């Protein structure tokens, strides 16, 4: 699996390269600036991009904008974004097109090697890997709106876990209930949100996140 990595801090970039290589990823390029990232994504066509939001020369949203441009040029390009803080605008932009694998992790998660590698693999496979703090904020900012406000506390809890990319079985294990109960909650959530139920976990997560993002 070929990875393009963009991170301006040398020690972190080098550490991520070593970590990914140790888990059988091929590093197609490891760059430190927006222009380098844009070239690498256009020329190397990686299986997944792991991108810091803030890169030189502007140190604003250079990395994210390069990733969004690459996804427009190559629809469905899997992108895992790294950020120091929860920045909802960036999360909404990344999720807006609803195609391909996407992820948004806080950099603190990078220090959990197993969790980080799992997130890269999940995104590369077309899935979703969202930091729990990002999901908490996306949900809380809509909690008083209809129809999200019509969900029960348990349904909101299930929705949060769904948005993290978890399957019904994983959610059932987390909440210590039966998988049948989770299936019922999931059905209720889609009905209340006016979203079509799908057997594809990744597509259903993207649909929920797209719903949370609309009208913003």
Image (spheres, rainbow, N blue to C red):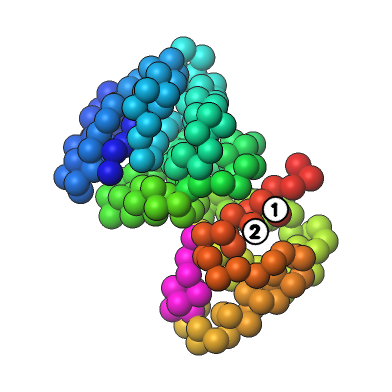
Frontmost residue, 203 versus 160: 203
Q: Position of residue 152 (x, y in %)?
A: 72, 74
As drawn, is 174 to the left or to the right of 20? right
Q: Residue tagged by mark 2? A: 208
Q: Position of residue 113 (x, y in %)?
A: 27, 50
Q: Which mark is residue 212?
A: 1
Q: Which residues are magenta?
A: 165-174
Q: Are marks 1 and 2 in contact (CB under 8 Å)?
A: yes
Residue 207, by quadrant, is bottom right
Residue 32 in the image: above or below residue 185:
above
Residue 187, by quadrant, is bottom right
- Residue extending farthest to the right is 146
Q: Position of residue 106 (x, y in %)?
A: 45, 43
How far is the residue under mark 1 from the one under mark 2? 6 Å
Residue 177 in the image: above or below residue 48:
below
Q: Identify the residue shown where x is 35% and y is 35%.
A: 46
Q: Identify the residue shown where x is 43% and y is 15%.
A: 35
Q: Where does the N terminus fall, quadrant-wise?
A: top left
As drawn, is 121 to the left or to the right of 196? left
């Amino acid at each position: 699996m070929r990875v393009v990595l963009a991170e301006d801090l040398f020690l972190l970039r080098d550490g991520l390269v070593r970590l990914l290589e140790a888990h059988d990823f091929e590093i197609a390029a490891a760059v430190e600036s927006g222009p380098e990232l844009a070239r690498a994504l256009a020329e190397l066509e990686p299986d997944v991009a792991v991108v810091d939001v803030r890169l030189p020369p502007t140190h604003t949203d250079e990395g994210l904008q390069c990733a969004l441009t690459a996804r427009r040029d190559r629809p469905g390009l899997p992108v895992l974004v790294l950020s120091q803080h929860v920045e909802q605008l960036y999360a909404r932009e990344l999720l807006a097109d609803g195609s391909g694998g996407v992820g948004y992790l806080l950099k603190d998660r990078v220090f959990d090697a197993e969790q980080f590698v799992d997130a890269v693999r999940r995104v590369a496979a077309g899935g979703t890997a969202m930091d729990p703090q990002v999901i908490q904020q996306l949900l809380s900012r809509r909690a008083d709106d209809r129809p999200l406000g019509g969900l029960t506390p348990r349904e909101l809890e299930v929705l949060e876990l769904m948005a993290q990319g978890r399957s019904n079985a994983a959610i059932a294990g987390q909440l210590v209930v039966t998988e049948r109960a989770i299936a019922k909650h999931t059905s209720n959530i889609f009905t209340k949100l006016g979203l079509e139920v799908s057997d594809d976990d990744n597509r259903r997560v993207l649909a929920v996140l797209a719903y949370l993002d609309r009208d913003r």
